[in-house]
Every structure is written in C-alpha cells, then in structure tokens.
Image (cartoon, rainbow, N blue to C red):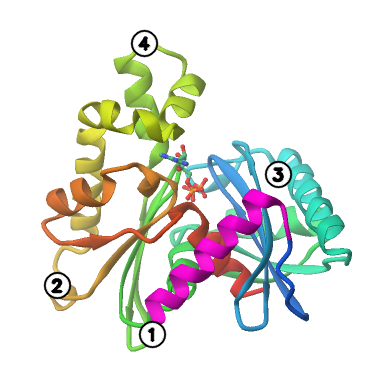
Amino acid sequence: DKTMEAYEKIYKLHELMETKTVADLPGPYKVGVDLGTADVVLVVADEAGNPVAGSLRWASVVKDGLVVDFRGAMLIVEELKAEVEERMGITLDKGATAIPPGTVGRNALACGHVIAGAGLEPVCQVDEPVAAAKALGITHGIVVDIGGGTTGIAVLRNGELVFTADEPTGGTHVSLVLAGAYKMPFEEAELLKRDAAQHRRIMPVILPVIEKMAAVVTAMLAGQEEYHDYPVYVVGGTACLQGFENEFSKAFGRKVHVPPHPLLVTPLGIAMFG
Ligand code: ATP
C-alpha cells in the first residue's frame, strides 16, 4: 500500500546516501534542502518523488528553528550541492526549503537566502511536518517531527492541512540530559546518543525527556478531540533512538509509528516540493 511504498523510498534514499551513489532515473529533478539544528541534508528526487541522490553533513547552523550561522549554512549547502552534482554529472539550479511551522518574519526568509547564496534558486518553502507528511504519503493523520531543536506537528484531514504547532524541544535536550548525567561535554553526549549500541543503556536516563516530548505533543493537541483516532507518525532524528516508538507510545497514551530512517523523511519530503 501507500505506506509501504513510502517506506521503500526512504530505505532507497538511505542506501543511496550510504553508498554515495545515484539512482538511474530520468530528469527533470527536484531538490530539497533541510537546514537543521544538528545537520544539513540535500536530497534530489525525480518528478514522481523517487529519491535520486542525497548527502548529509552534521553541523549546527540552526538553533530553535532559526538560522544562526548564515555563512556556515551557505558553505555547507554549496559543498553538498557540488558533491551531488559531481555524482550526477549535472548542475542543480533550484530547490525547496522548509521551516518549523511557527517561524515568522525575516527568520522565515533566511533558509531561502541561504540556498540562494549557495546557487539554488528557492522555489518553495514548506512547513517541516508538512514535508514529512508528503514523504510518507499521508493525507489523513498526525505527523510529529522531533528534530534537534524543535518539535513540530501537522494534522492532515482528507489531504488538507488543518492544524500545525511547534515547540522548542528536541534531540538537543536529550543530549543536554546525557551530558549532565555522564558529566561529559555536549559534543560527546551527541556522539554517544547517535551510537545505536548505547541506546539500551542510555534509555533510562533519557526517558524523562521522551515523556516530556509526549507531554508537549499532548498539550498541542489539547481540545482537538476530533483527531483522537488519527494515525500518528513520528519522524525526525530523535525518533532514531531504539525503543523510542515504544516509550513515546506509552507516554503519549496512543500507539505511534516510526518509519525507517526517520531522520531522512522530512528531507525527502522537501525534495518532493522542489
Ligand atoms: P530542527 O528541525 O529541530 O532544526 P534538525 O532538522 O537538525 O532539527 P533532524 O535532522 O530531524 O532535526 O534530527 C536531528 C536530531 O536527531 C539531533 O538532535 C540528533 O542528535 C538526533 N539524532 C540523529 N541521529 C540519531 C540517532 N541515530 N539516534 C538518536 N538521535 C539521533
């Protein structure tokens, strides 16, 4: 069905990125750039939304949904663009970006300026959870995007976006708690957290943060009883934690679904808007 098809695309994108290869699919191509708190991801998709190529760089150019290192972000997008262009043997000239739902004013324009500075004409800017919903092929349901700095949600009803919300909590808070508990620098805690072999050991320490995230999402949906039976999908890098699906479901009081490689879902969705 549709979900399986979407999951296949995400698996494929992950494989293309890991092997630094290109899918043999004809153009025209669409480009998406996700500027995040913890990483920058550039994805190329074909007209049908199939992944063609992608590249990721760990970097902190965004904080709480705001671009804080404009020049650094621009240079990274330039590098990722050059890398993917070299792999594909073509030039990429335009692309889409995304922002957390609550971003306003100049901050909302910053992502477009960043990719323009890197040589990609910005064609479209979407809300991050809306991009995630697109990648998952969801027209009816709730998408929760837990990135590094922000937790955003989008509710879709019959293909229409009916509700969005955004709060500044995310994977950064998980790392801060780890840094405190194990008395280590933040950067070290980030690496510890991204090591799947450590997830079982660190879960008891970070469980309160996951519970807090579930409480944040519950508060966002307070008074919106009509969505109580909508399927819930959680994406974003924080959902990569082993056991996350189970613990978040328990704390949220509803079964949630975590797709494969949740870190890549929003970037793929952004490319689909390119
Ligand atoms: P935001 O949208 O909030 O600006 P972002 O776009 O950087 O942030 P994502 O790329 O979805 O968000 O997720 C980044 C977060 O996921 C970081 O906190 C990072 O430490 C965490 N993360 C990445 N990989 C893993 C992993 N394997 N296990 C646990 N956490 C991970």
Disc number placed over residue 73 in the picture, else none: 3
**What SS does tag 1 mark?**
strand
Q: Residues within 10 Å of mark 3 (few under 14, many from 20)?
A: many
Quarter of image, res 88: bottom right
Q: Which residue is depicted at the point 35% across and 33% down?
A: 174
Residue 194 lies, in percent from the top left, at 45, 34
**What SS does tag 4 mark?**
loop
* Residue type of the residue flagged with mark 3: Ala
Q: Indicate which disc, 2 or 4, sits on the residue closer to the N terminus.
A: 4
Q: Indicate which disc, 4 or 1, sits on the residue closer to the N terminus.
A: 1
* 14 in the magenta segment: yes
**What SS does tag 3 mark?**
helix
Give the CA separation, mark 3 to mark 4: 30 Å
Assign the magenta stretch its main secondary structure: helix
Give whichever of 84, 147 is nearer the camera.
Answer: 84
* Residue type of the residue flagged with mark 4: Lys
Q: Indicate which disc, 1 or 2, sits on the residue closer to the N terminus.
A: 1
Magenta residues? 1-21
Query: Which residue in the structure is indicated by mark 2?
Result: 228
Give the CA separation, mark 2 to mark 4: 40 Å
Disc number placed over residue 217 in the picture, else none: none
Residue 244 lies, in percent from the top left, at 27, 46
Give the CA separation, mark 3 to mark 2: 39 Å
Disc number placed over residue 183 in the picture, else none: 4
Give the CA separation, mark 1 to mark 2: 17 Å
Query: Which residue in the structure is indicated by mark 1?
Result: 160
* Residue type of the residue flagged with mark 1: Glu
Above or below 177: residue 140: below
Q: Which residue is depicted at the point 14% across and 72% down?
A: 228
User: Which quadrant of the rendered structure holds the C terminus?
Assistant: bottom right
Q: Residues within 10 Å of mark 2 (few under 14, many from 20)?
A: few
